Amino acid sequence: MKCLVTGGAGFIGSNLVDSLVDSGCEVVAIDDESASQNEQFYWNNNARNYKYDICDYNLIKPLFDGVDVVFHLAAESRIQVAIKNPSRAVNVNCNGTNNVMLASKEARVKKVIYSSTSSYYGIKNTVPNKESMARDCLNPYSVTKVAGEDIVLMYSRLYGIDTLIFRYFNVYGERQPIKGQYAPVIGLFQKMKNEGLDMTVVGDGQARRDYTHVSDVVNANIIAANLDLKCDGEVINIGTGVNYSVMDLVDMIGGPYKHIAPRKGEAKETLADINKAKKILNWEPKIRLEDWIQNNK
């Protein structure tokens, strides 16, 4: 199988590329190395690697020739960064996604798997979050990522491209971004503790999230790529069905902390209903957050 991974040198993308290469796939990886939270980028020497921007259609289009499955992970992916620069979020997450879909259409790619976000659910929806719930986008990140869902679905319905949309719930694990104040909280807290700094708890620390290990996310993508079933734009949550507060994380990691001001545009609680993932993909998460933190102290 020939696969193309956008965002292939980033956190989730590089883990996916490694897994695809190890399974014997021919892999093309695209990444412009623009993610400001990444301390480094991870290119697999056994993939064909291109430091390209998905917003440049003419540049990326030839790379889709002969590709069977596209995994579209490239994005402006941090909420607070997108709030500061909404134009970039629109360009990357909307225009970039259209470019990926158009290139896939022109190259007659068999399947596109789009990485979306649990930010879709916002604050109006009660937990557990079900795929059938109405969108409640609170910030430029969620607005543009969910617009990306609409673009993917449009290409599926209008042009017949087989697509699958994953909504990830707070992914953590090896290679997670730890640079800057808006990096994902688990890696950020671990870094602060290791450097002898107080962990910075946003607001009262009672915001709850469903934390999903990157290997479980990668496994869901691999299963989906090999699924002998037309997906037709199916939307599937990828989470654990368990959530934790920020203060729970402080207790697990251990060490001093301090409270900082609340942030705009963020939900109070996420919790994935993963029944569709179990039913359609026969997928379940394998890594427990407590175990991973304990093993990575």
Image (tube, rainbow, N blue to C red):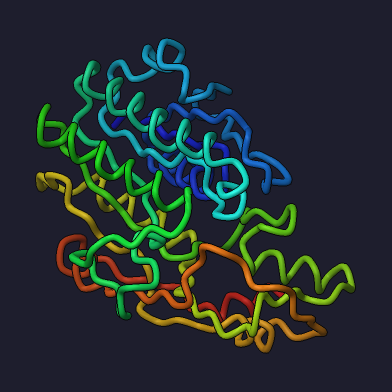
Res 294 visible: no
Q: Residue at x 38, y 74 (%)?
A: 240
Q: Residue at x 30, y 73 (%)?
A: 129
Whole-percent x and y of residue 289?
53, 77
Q: Is residue 62 left or right of residue 278?
A: right
Whole-percent x and y of residue 221?
33, 50
89, 97: nearer the viewer: 89
Q: Residue at x 62, y 56 (%)?
A: 176
Q: Quadrant of residue 72?
A: top left
Q: Residue at x 81, y 74 (%)?
A: 193
Q: Quadrant of residue 210?
A: bottom left
Res 36 visible: yes
Whole-percent x and y of residue 105?
21, 22
Which part of the image, by quadrant, shows the C terminus?
bottom right
48, 24: nearer the viewer: 48
Q: Is residue 175 left or right of residue 285?
A: right
Residue 214 to residue 242: above or below: above
Residue 153 to residue 68: above or below: below
Q: So how many labels did they put on this image?
A: 0
Whole-percent x and y of residue 282?
21, 66
- Determine the residue located farthest toward the right in the rendered image: 196
Which part of the image, by quadrant, shows the N terminus?
top left
Residue 175 to residue 195: above or below: above
